[in-house]
Image: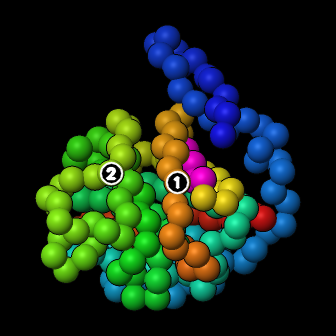
Amino acid sequence: MVHKLVQHEDGTLGVRPPDHVARYFEVTNKLVSLPLTGDWQVGEDTLSCDSPQAYAALLTRNQVPESGHLSFRFRFRTGTERIGLAVQVNEDFARGYYFYLDPKRQRIEFKSGIRMHEQGGWTFPFDVEIERPLELLPDTDYCADLFMDGSVMVLYVNDTALSVRVYDLKERRFGFIVSDGSAAFSDIALLT
């Protein structure tokens, strides 16, 4: 996917999706949520979770489309370990692809199901497949856009992008994650 370059006030560059890409997707799909673990509050296009000492997961009943755009806003409270988005995840949340937002390490991380095996995925728990630096501050609004086209996925968080390929998992669902903290997701929309 081609990115649109933007210049920040301090002179640094960021990237956003080109305007025509977001306009391509017009059909709105209603997300149906199924909380798995944690104390989730589910609204029409909002989710929030307070999980101060545990990993909380919510699964949607919506399958990941072959081509589509998932957008949402999020914010988290001080001390939150991580929040995230699961893609192509199975019903028990054990296999899939995971985009984690890690305030402690100030980065977006991407992990696949191979990291989630009982044996630890044969890697260290803090090891990730791909990462991008991203300043993540508590009580701040962030905008996220995930574009999907076949095996290509691009996640934009504000002006930072992380592109990945996902090959082997199909016809699975989206999920949201809050680990050891509190977070809220709003303006959630799935367009195809």
Label located before the other in sequence (2 or 1): 2
Is 21 positioned to the left or the right of 119 in the image? Answer: right
Q: Residue at x 72, y 62 (%)?
A: 67
The N terminus, quarter of image = top right
Q: Residue at x 47, y 83 (%)?
A: 90
Residue ranking furthest to the front:
168
The C terminus, quarter of image = bottom right
Q: Which residue is mark 1?
A: 165
Q: Give percent across and percent down for residue 51.
A: 28, 75
Badge 2 marks a residue whose secondary structure is loop
Q: Give percent across and percent down for residue 117.
A: 25, 76
Badge 1 marks a residue whose secondary structure is strand
Is 190 positioned to the left or the right of 6 in the image? Answer: right
* Towards the viewer: 29 or 143: 29
- Vertical relation: 18 (above or below) 142: above
Q: Residue at x 42, y 58 (%)?
A: 99
Q: Residue at x 60, y 85 (%)?
A: 61
Which residues fall within the magenta stretch?
152-156
Which amino acid is tagged 2?
Answer: Glu
- Vertical relation: 123 (above or below) 173: above
* Towards the viewer: 34 or 24: 24
30 is within the stretch colored magenta = no
Q: Which mark is residue 33?
A: none
Q: Which residue is mark 2?
A: 129
How many numbered marks are there? 2
Is 108 positioned to the left or the right of 159 in the image? Answer: left
- Vertical relation: 89 (above or below) 164: below
How packed is label 1: few (under 14 Cα within 10 Å), some, or many (20 or more)? few
- Marks 2 and 1 sit apart, C-alpha to C-alpha, by 11 Å
Which amino acid is tagged 1?
Answer: Arg
Is 191 positioned to the left or the right of 12 in the image? Answer: right
Say which quarter of the image contains residue 83. bottom left
